[in-house]
Amino acid sequence: MLSHWRSSSTYEVEDLLHYKDLIPRLEVALRKFSKLDSAEVIQPVRTTVPLQKYNGFLGLMPAYLVHEDILCTKLVCFYKRESGSTLPSTQATVLLFDPEYGNVKAVMDGEVITAKRTAAVSAISAKLLMPTKSDVLTILGAGHQALSHYHVFTETFSFKEVRVWSRRKETAERFAQSTQGHVTVWESVEEAVNGADVIVTVTGASEPVLFGQWVKPGAHVAAVGACRPDWRELDDVLMRQAEVYVDSREGAVAESGDIILSGAKVFAELGEVLNGTRPALREKTTVFKSLGMGIQDAVSAKLVFEQWKNKH
Ligand SMILES: NC(=O)C1=CN([C@@H]2O[C@H](COP(=O)(O)OP(=O)(O)OC[C@H]3O[C@@H](n4cnc5c(N)ncnc54)[C@H](O)[C@@H]3O)[C@@H](O)[C@H]2O)C=CC1
Ligand SMILES: O=C([O-])C1=[NH+]CCC1
């Protein structure tokens, strides 16, 4: 009960958190979150504190899963970085509490949790919404999320071709080399997404980088960046022509510039599709607009803690 585990490192969390365990738990959490009458999940919309001087935000992401008795909060700073900056664009710490006593049970590095749980939720969206025959995956962006998305998408699905684009060609080339897979580097977004079945946008952009006219009808887009009401990754054409799925409706209408500024309607939460209360329109062009939720961090942190206890 009072066991404390202070300051796990990035490497420890990396070693303890695996997609095969994480994905089923995230699916359960998404289902519970989207049940209309659910009192099982308590998760206020993220509070953000602007850090204007540094072009960034501090996000506070508390969540309580009543049945599982998981009380957790993530503290995450995220920034808009200039091209060529070597500073990290996201840094996070996760606190896991004992809900009965209020003491902190564990303090964990939040970067791996953020990278893996976000990519795992995108993989869940793709499993539900991508075309039945999906051969080509394009990743736009070549940072931390790009790498975690590459890993989970290639572990979970069998793409024949994986492409990457980044603002700077050298970054995309470094990314391709680091995967040791068969990733091809493309110099323009238009060419990189031409014919792609699945497109992952994981950029720090605040203006659209992906335009609807370039996207193959029926493709699935997992849009992970642009998590502020005035930031965009996707243009109006794409947002209006696609069926839009989200992790949380409440979060999406408060935080997603792609949804707010395009006026696009949210068709469903992923949890509603998992619950069978809204359909997966796989044959249509679909966008999953991801913003990230505290419950995703909470189930990840619980999993890391369990794995750690098994080893000690
Ligand atoms: N939906 C969610 O749950 C989460 C979303 N994010 C967001 O995902 C995005 C990627 O995060 P990380 O991979 O950690 O960042 P990163 O800094 O590791 O990588 C960002 C990538 O975007 C590119 N980029 C930056 N500005 C750009 C611009 N104006 N146009 C085109 N490309 C640009 C960079 O060159 C780099 O390839 C960020 O927007 C971040 O805020 C991060 C964590 C969770
Ligand atoms: O869910 C998350 O951790 C974040 N969403 C946007 C930046 C960080």
Image (cartoon, helix red, strand yellow):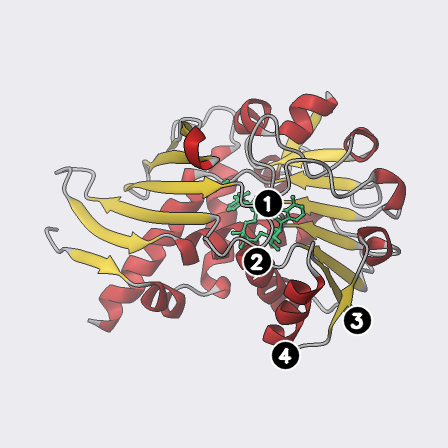
Which residue is under mark 1? 204
What's the distance in space between the residues labelled 4 and 1, CA to CA? 24 Å
Determine which quarter of the picture holds residue 226: top right
Which residue is under mark 4? 180
Q: Residue at x 75, y 51 (%)?
A: 130
Q: Are marks 2 and 1 in contact (CB under 8 Å)?
A: yes
Residue 79: tell me if it is visible.
Answer: yes
* Disc on the earlier residue, 4 or 1: 4
Q: Determine whether the residue tagged by mark 3 lies in a helix, strand or loop.
A: loop
Q: Are marks 4 and 1 in contact (CB under 8 Å)?
A: no
Which residue is under mark 2? 143
Q: Residues within 10 Å of mark 2 (few under 14, many from 20)?
A: some
Task: Kindly report which numbered mark, 2 or 4, lies closer to the viewer in this rendering.
Answer: 2
Looking at the picture, which amino acid does disc 3 mark?
Answer: Lys
Q: Determine whether the residue tagged by mark 1 lies in a helix, strand or loop.
A: loop
Horizontally, residue 56 falls left or right of residue 101, namely right
Residue 312 picture location, percent across and down: 19, 71
Task: Kindly report which numbered mark, 3 or 4, lies closer to the viewer in this rendering.
Answer: 4
Number of numbered tags placed on the structure image: 4
Asked if ligand 1 lies within 8 A of label 1, the reply is yes
* Disc on the earlier residue, 2 or 4: 2
Q: Residues within 10 Å of mark 1 (few under 14, many from 20)?
A: many
